[in-house]
Amino acid sequence: MSEGIKKISNIQIARQKLINEAEAARDERNYKMLTTKMEMLRQNYKDEQDTVYKMQSELRDAERYTRETIDYKAKTVVPQLASVLTGDEQADSESIATVAKQVGIPTSALYAEVQRYKQEQEKDLPTSLGEYKAALRLGIVPKGTSYTQWKTFDSNSVGKSSSAKLITTPQAISLGSKNLIGVSQDDVINSMTSETGTFVKSPPAWFVDSLQKDAGKDLNEPELEALWAEYTSNPAVQNFIKTGKVEDESESDLLQ
């Protein structure tokens, strides 16, 4: 770049000299010399233009090289960096800034690559975004749990419950109580129904605990029974009693 600037400076100095010589030839009516100097001036302007174009091309190449270098460094460190991020926005921002400084790239570039990497990882998750958000909302997983960490947590829960016929994480989300995770499906159904197969009049303990925790106070018996009646009239709950499955296991928080 400095060589190009120096070359342009020399071209401009030569141009001024050619202009002076062309004016002298004109004053002396030396038209042959004037023609020669004018041709040289045209070439001088062309040389300057070519030099500018070359400098612009070199600058674009340098910028592209810089971007490619930044992208390469970011892609190299992000997998390991993402594995230690906790989901705490402030702490994660500090971690990203520290790593960016260590590898010599802009923090914004590394942050963008972290977000892109997370999105790529989320494509393969077995659980939906709705289940993840519901799990956070219900407190099934700690606040700050990343989507990738949720993938591992949920796959372990589902794997254990599929063989033992326990309440799975998605079912617990849909039924509205994190207390049900890992509990026997038969035990839950038995707590909800009488010997004749109808719903019990008084709600089971897990239902009461969930409601009172959400309400932040103790509910009286009429209130609990009214809410229980509303809850058990839900088609998804009735289907669970009949089949042991919840049809919509994404974002249906039935206790809300």
Image: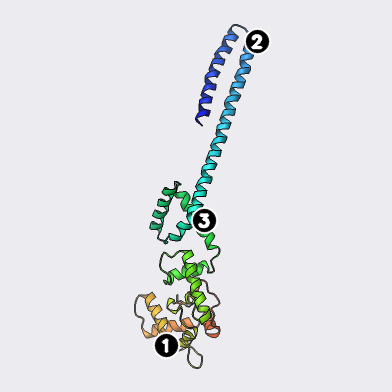
Secondary element at image label 1: loop
- Identify the amino acid type marked 3: Arg
Neighbor class of circle 3 (other Cα within 10 Å; few <14, some 14-19, many 20+) is: some
Residue 143 horizontal/vertical position (percent): 40, 66
Q: Is residue 87 above or below residue 58?
A: below
Residue 128 shows in the view: yes
Residue lying farthest top? 28
Q: CA distance from mark 2 to mark 3?
A: 67 Å
Q: Residue at 49%, 51% (x, y): give it.
A: 74
Exactly how many numbered labels are in the figure? 3
Residue bearing mark 2: 32
Q: Residue at 47%, 67% (x, y): give it.
A: 150
The disc label shown at residue 202, or none: 1
Residue bearing mark 3: 116
Sequence order check: which comes first, mark 1 or mark 3? 3
Q: Nearer the viewer, mark 2 or mark 3?
A: 3
Residue 136 horizontal/vertical position (percent): 44, 68
Neighbor class of circle 2 (other Cα within 10 Å; few <14, some 14-19, many 20+) is: few
Q: Residue at 61%, 14% (x, y): give it.
A: 37
Q: Is residue 39 above or below residue 141?
A: above
**Front residue of 121 and 140:** 121
The disc label shown at residue 184, or none: none
Q: Residue at 59%, 21% (x, y): give it.
A: 44
**Quarter of the figure with the C terminus:** bottom left
